[in-house]
């Protein structure tokens, strides 16, 4: 399905404080009776230079939101802007270029190339794009992440935390407008996880980056400036300056609702929701 172009008033996200914006963002998977509404008319502004966490129960739409904001997935309705550019309606080739030039990604699996050393992995996206890194910026990223004396090491010669730091440096290397991190600490022990969260925090505080992180972990969310809570494909709450305890308490309320009422069924045909199937 494509975005109905005239449904929302046109206009770019403000060039100042908003790194990404969605209006009426709707994403449905499947069709007819088996339609699952993963995102239900979401309006969101991702503030520039801040660390935003996205939380919510399994199946609430966190990854879908991230993928739609990053232009990795097409939307069923609504509009998405990255900075001043409306990305809904862009052709795949334009989207690929935009993602390459303006977005950094960090995933749970680090996706490092085993035959390349750390330095080569960090600059790989730019090498593929045929662009030259800004050496001063790259030096700053490498030093901030404490990778200076690990640059010649291959991934197999690095610890999990160091590998994730390389993935973090790779996401930062091209100085993207926006970094999307999907469960970046999911595969790490708690010490390495804390390290990575600390570096994401520093990327925001010291390097002025914008980070959006999907997580299940209240402790991880506590490193952010703002937590957006998704429930059944909608943003149902948000929390500024979160603490792990406050986030945990908020998440328990989702469990409470589920405990009392059972899972709300979002599939049009009344079948089990995907979260029930998980
Ligand atoms: N490719 C797909 N085809 C069909 N349904 C999908 C697809 N991707 C996601 N969904 C459904 O959309 C809903 C939202 O999924 P999404 O992965 O965004 O949730 P999530 O909050 O990230 O979940 P989790 O915390 O378990 O990773 C779920 O009901 C899911 O089953």
Image (cartoon, rainbow, N blue to C red):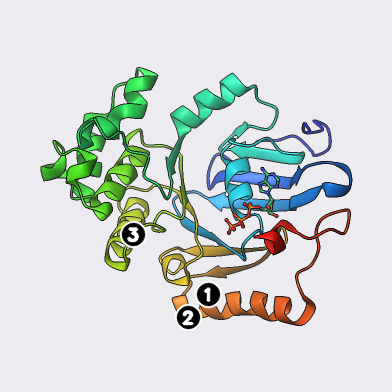
Task: Give SS at disc 2.
Answer: helix
Mark 3 to mark 2: distance in Å? 21 Å
Residue 185, located in which quarter of the rendered image?
Answer: bottom left
Could you tell me which secondary element the residue under label 3 belongs to?
loop
Question: Quadrant of residue 184 in the image?
Answer: bottom left
Between 62 and 209, the residue placed more toward the observer is: 62
In the rendered view of the protein, which quadrant contains the N terminus? Answer: top right
In this rendering, would 122 be left or right of 62? left
Circle nearer the N terminus (3, 2): 3
Return the x and y of residue 66 as percentages of the image width and height.
57, 47
The residue under the point 50% across, 60% down is: 215
Residue shown at 22% from the left, 49% from the top:
144
> Circle 1 sits on which residue?
247
Q: Residues within 10 Å of mark 3 (few under 14, many from 20)?
A: some
Q: Mark 2 = which residue?
A: 245
Q: Residue furthest left?
A: 149
| Classed neighbour count for the residue bearing mark 2: other residues with Cα under 10 Å, few (<14), some (14–19), many (≥20) | few
Say which residue appears at 77% left-offset and 75% top-offset.
262
Q: Are marks 1 and 2 in contact (CB under 8 Å)?
A: yes
Disc 3 marks which residue?
Answer: 188
The location of residue 93, given as percent across then percent down, is 57, 19
For the C terminus, the image quarter is bottom right
Up the image or down, 127 lies above or below 198; here it is above
């Amino acid at each position: 399905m494509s975005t109905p172009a005239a449904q929302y008033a046109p206009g770019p996200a403000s060039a100042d404080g908003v790194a990404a914006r969605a209006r009426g963002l709707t994403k449905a998977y499947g069709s007819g009776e088996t339609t699952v509404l993963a995102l239900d008319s979401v309006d969101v502004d991702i503030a520039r230079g801040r660390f935003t966490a996205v939380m919510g129960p399994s199946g609430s739409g966190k990854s879908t939101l991230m993928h739609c904001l990053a232009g990795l997935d097409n939307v069923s309705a609504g509009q998405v802007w990255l900075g001043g550019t409306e990305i809904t309606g862009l052709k795949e080739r334009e989207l690929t270029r935009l993602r390459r030039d303006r977005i950094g990604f960090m995933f749970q699996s680090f996706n490092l190339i085993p035959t390349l050393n750390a330095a080569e992995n960090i600059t790989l996206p730019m090498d593929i794009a045929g662009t030259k890194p800004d050496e001063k910026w790259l030096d700053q990223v490498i030093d901030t992440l404490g990778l200076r004396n690990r640059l010649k090491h291959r991934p197999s010669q690095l610890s999990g935390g160091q590998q994730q730091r390389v993935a973090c440096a790779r996401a930062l290397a091209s100085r993207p407008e926006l970094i999307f991190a999907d469960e970046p600490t999911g595969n790490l022990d708690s010490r390495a996880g804390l390290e990575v969260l600390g570096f994401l925090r520093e990327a925001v505080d010291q390097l002025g980056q914008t980070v959006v992180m999907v997580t299940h972990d209240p402790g991880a969310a506590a490193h952010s400036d703002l937590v957006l809570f998704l429930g059944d494909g909608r943003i149902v709450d948000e929390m500024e300056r979160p603490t792990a305890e406050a986030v945990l308490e908020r998440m328990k309320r989702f469990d409470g609702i589920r405990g009392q009422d059972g899972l709300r069924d979002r599939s049009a045909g009344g079948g089990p929701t995907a979260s029930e199937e998980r």
